[in-house]
Structures are given as structure tokens and as C-alpha cells.
Amino acid sequence: MDTSTSNFDAHITHNMQIIDVGTASLSESFQSLKSKSQQTSQNQVQLHDVKCKLKEVEDELVEVLAEKARKVAKKMALMNAIASAKARVGNLNTSIQEVRARKQEYSAFLSEQSLALAASERKLNENIEHTNETREAISWYNRVLGFHVKGGHGVKFMFKYINVKNPNEEYTFIVSHDKNTYTLLSCEPPLDGIEELVDELNKTNGLFKFVKAMRKKFQETLVQESLVLTTVEPGESAFISSSAPAPDTSIRSDYTITENEHQVELSDGSAQLKKKNNRRRKSLALLSPDSASSVRKSPRLKVRK
């Protein structure tokens, strides 16, 4: 019986030891679980913090990517602007070259026009001077020979200072030119033997020579009618002794002027206008073309047709 009790006590003691060991193990497990639970809670807090930080990092990354995209877009726009500016610079360089070329052309044109203008001004001044000289020459012919020309149906030539007794008496003739043929329309006073002069005029086209011959013909007719030489009074010789207005003047050919309805065209060469004093001459038989040339050598006149 004692043995059974001892075994039972031993068994109880053994079980108690097992229970104590299990309790200690359970307590350790509980402590371990509690520690792990606390660690898990801490890990969850850390995980939450990490998630928050990760979200912040993601937001920052989105902002960085957006900024990068904006910079890339800005860079592309800047590159496009640079390319466009380079293209405009190229176009401007081309335009500048064209403008420079046109400027050189305009400069050359203006230089040519300036030279032409200067030449025109010189020619105009020469023409004005020549016109004045020619008008003086025509005025001298009108004053000394009483020579006038009028246009109309044909060209009317008028002479004075042929008749010494009546210096203002007019001697006229009218010549027309049609189809390269000269025709004497009228002659006052009438003259004999002028058909040969008209034929010679049509052959040679020497109108000035014909006018000179007609004046000489008027003088010869007057001499034949009067049969005497007329003495010119000193007062009447004044119109003969008038000197030419401008000495040593060269008159160019084919230049037309108008002086009080008188149109005369000068041609073929130059004339020397010389001053001579004939006031001491007391008498002249007739004022012939030869005597007039002794006062002044006249330029050859070609009447406008």
C-alpha cells in the first residue's frame, strides 16, 4: 500500500513537474507571442510610415517626371525656334545679298543718270548759248539786210534795203517744197529769167544759194531800171555799218529757231562774225550780197520747209 501511494505521489509529482514545465513553456510562448505582437505592431507602424514615404516619393517622382516632360517640351520648342530663327537668318542673308546687288545696280544707274544729266545740262547750256548767238545773228540779218522769213502756204522770203531811195520797200518771193520739188509760187516785183534758178535749185537743193541769187536778181533788175548808181546819204549808211553782235561765233548746222515769226535753220559749217566800222563810207551804189558779206561773213541759211 505504501508502495502504491509512493508511486502515486511520484506520478503526481512527475505530472506536476510536467505541468510546471508546460506552464513555463506556455508563459514563455505567451511572452514570445506578446513580443512578436509588439514587434508586429511596430512593423505595421513602420510599414505605414514607409507607405507614406513611398507615396511622397511617388508624388515627387510624378512631379519630377512632369517637370522633365515640361523641360523636354520646352527644349523641343526652343530647338524649333532656333531652327526657325536660323531659317529666317538665312532668308535675311539672301535678302541682304539681293538688296546689296540692287543697291549696286541702282548706284550704277544713278551714276549713269548723273553723267547723262550733266551731259544734258552741258548740251542745254550750249544750246541756249547757241540759240542766243543765232538770234543775234538773225537779228543782224534782219537789221542790216532787212531779211525776213514767214511760213504759211510755202515759205515767204522778204528783203529790204535793196532800193536805196526807198530802203523800206519790200522785195518778196514764195517758194514751196512738195515731193522733193521746189516751186516758185510768186515773186514781187516779177523777175525775168528765174526759171533757170528754179531748175538749178531742184538739181542742187541749194536753197541758200537760190535766195542769194534772187536777192542779186532783184538788185540787177533795179539797176537796169534805174540805169544809174544811187548815192547813199551818210544817215542811210547807218544800217550798213552796223557790226555783228558777237564775233568769232561758230554756228552749228541744222538748228532751228523762231524769231518774231521768222523760222530759219542754220546748216553746213560756221560763220565768223567780224566787226567793221564803215561809218566813214559816204556812199554805196547798192547793198548787194557781196557788199553785205564785206560787213560780215554770214552763215549758210537753210530755210525750214
Image (spheres, grey):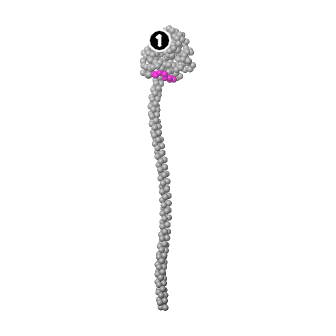
Q: Residue at x 48, y 78 (%)?
A: 30
Mark 1 crowd level (few <14, some 14–19, many ≥20, 10 Å Cα): some
Q: Which residue is mark 1?
A: 285
5, 67: nearer the viewer: 5
Amino acid on which disc 1 is placed: Ala
Secondary structure found at label 1? loop
Q: How many marks?
A: 1
What residue lies at 45% left-to-right and 29% top-to-bottom? 119
User: Image check: 192 left or right of 274?
Assistant: right
User: In this picture, is 124 found above or below 213?
Assistant: below
From the top left corner, tell me how far across and down residue 132 is, in percent.
47, 25
Highlighted range, magenta: 251-259
74 vs 59, nearest the viewer: 59
Relative to the observer, which residue lies in front, 152 or 48? 48
Asked if residue 238 shows in the view, the reply is: no
Q: Residue 5, position in %: x, y? A: 48, 89
- Measured as percent of width and height from the top left, residue 114 is found at 45, 32
